[in-house]
Image (tube, rainbow, N blue to C red):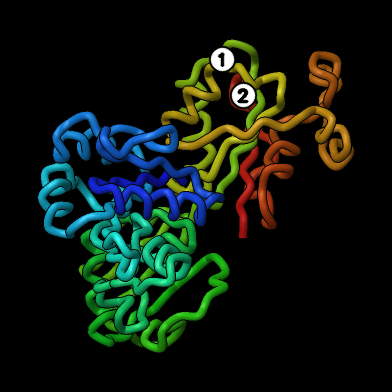
Amino acid sequence: MNWAIVALTKDGTQQGKKIKKILNNINLEIYTLKKWSDEETLVIDKKLEEFVGSIFHKYDIIIFIMATGIVVRSIAKHIVNKTTDPGVLVMDEKGQFVISLLSGHLGGANEAAKLLADKMGGQPVITTASDVKGLIAVDTLAQKLNCQISSMDKAKNLTGLIVNNESVLIKSNINIDMKLPDNILTEGEAKGTIFITNRVINKFSEYEVQLIPKNIVIGIGCRSGISGEAIVNAIKEALDLFNIDYRSIKHFATVDIKQNEAGIFDAAKHFKTIVKIVNRKEIKNIEHEFHCSEFVRKSIGVGAVCEPCALLTASKGHFLMRKKSYNGITLSIWEEL
């Protein structure tokens, strides 16, 4: 994660340096006025509101060491959406209070405030209802389970039920290894339902929402020069066979000889995911577990690609689809549990 500290005074800048030293495992940059700047800091070279706009979506967490009112006025016009805005903290110059001001859940500001206050010996100030009551918001649950939310409006409705102590039912296809509040049930009747599944659900009531786990790994092999469009279409056809939501793709996996194959990376961009590269030496250790092609072995040195690549880059789970060919493309689908 990338963090930034913004300070306007000498004492605030010194406090920023102290934070950077304490949080030495976080990539953190300090911004201050030119008169307080040195080799450890970067210069605020614009009016504060304009400067904040230039960095607002560059960092995951932004810590302002100044008065809350100044911060509110500076960030107001740059706020877009809770799914994209950074977590914003405000801290006084002595580090007595660390306020989670914006994007407490999805942006990580609440957790960051707790971490920073703990390290600085201060008091975190968190006002989100679910946290104050020791409950859990739907967006926090999604974040902890690495899920995408199908509808933020529906998530808000379900969180409203939770914080008002109404019962909410979870129906999940993945393991939930965490303690849930007493009013979140795994069986029985409830006022609302949270579906946690990578399968496509077409209709929801007002008090139903889906959390889509990122637990599908696509193993890919392909002919050289294959287009991204062809790979996208093949993946869609494969996932549709199993009624899998495209948003559940965690990553693609392919062999090192394909690390510059444009079509694979174009397809990954389409699905907003990443490509993991597997060394052929790793594949050789397990390729005996798969059906191998002698033609492929003569071409690249290993006889299997899409299945071992998926397996080697995934967590515990199983194959939904073993190797299947699509006009010069081979795909496998691994589902993490």
Residue 305 position, x and y percent, is 73, 30
Q: Is residue 125 above or below residue 271?
A: below
Which quadrant of the structure image shows residue 203? bottom left
The numbered disc on residue 226 is: 1
**Judging from the image, what secondary structure is the residue with disc 1 in?**
loop
Which quadrant of the structure image shows residue 275? top right
Residue 232 position, x and y percent, is 47, 28
- Residue topped by disc 2: 329
**Judging from the image, what secondary structure is the residue with disc 2 in?**
strand
Between the residue at mark 1 and the residue at mark 2, the CA separation in whole angstroms equals 8 Å
- Identified by mark 2, the residue type is Ile
Relative depth, front residue between 127 and 297 = 127
Instruction: Classify residue 88 as left or right of residue 334.
Output: left
- Identified by mark 1, the residue type is Ile
Asked if labels 2 and 1 touch by Cβ distance under 8 angstroms, the answer is: yes
Residue 204 in view in this figure: no
Q: Residue at x 63, y 30 (%)?
A: 220
The numbered disc on residue 240 is: none
Q: Is residue 183 above or below residue 255?
A: below
Residue 337 in view in this figure: yes
Q: Residue at x 55, y 52 (%)?
A: 215
Residue 74 position, x and y percent, is 14, 46
Q: Residue at x 56, y 50 (%)?
A: 25
